[in-house]
Amino acid sequence: MNANFTQHEILLMTGTSFSTSLRVMKDDQGKADQYTEKEQLEDACWNGLLQEMLPEAYAKTEHSGMLYLWQIREAAFFLELEIGEFPAAIDKYYSIDPYSFLETKTFS
């Protein structure tokens, strides 16, 4: 019998109004300008702001347990987030990351 588990892959595009609204840094000393947009967005995701902005990504199904943010990968124009019950390898063929699934496509 196959075990069912929940795993999400989310791409957050940088340079958009949504990513700008997520990257709110609370810094009393004005050091937010030292960090790039991607660094601020990644920090906001690790600090739980993503769960507030995208609650449907963390919605439980009848088979799922608690969902956690396991990994954030940085690409040229987006951040790839892996959310799931436990860390698991993502099949490149079914991935939404263009750098992953394009490797598996055969062009003729």
Image: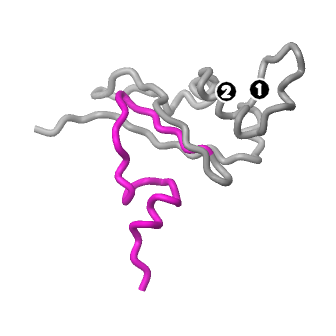
Callout 1 secondary element: loop
Height in image: 27 above or below 34? above
Magenta residue check for 75: no
Quarter of the picture containing the N terminus is: top left
Please give left or right for residue 49 compared with residue 81 in the image: right
Q: Which residues are magenta?
A: 79-108
Height in image: 88 above or below 27? below
Residue under label 1, please give it: 24
Q: Residue at x 88, y 15 (%)?
A: 29
Residue under label 2, please give it: 44
Residue 35's quadrant in the figure? Answer: top right
Magenta residue check for 87: yes
The three-letter code of the residue at mark 2 reads Ala
The three-letter code of the residue at mark 1 reads Val
Please give left or right for residue 86 compared with residue 100 in the image: left
Height in image: 95 above or below 104? above
Q: Residue at x 62, y 43 (%)?
A: 12
Residue extending farthest top: 28
Q: Residue at x 58, y 31 (%)?
A: 54
Height in image: 78 above or below 68? below
Callout 2 secondary element: helix
Mark linked to residue 36: none
Q: Could you say which is closer to the camera, residue 73 or residue 10?
A: 73
Answer yes or no: do the residues labelled 2 and 1 have beta carbons within 8 Å?
yes
Please give left or right for residue 14 compared with residue 51 in the image: right
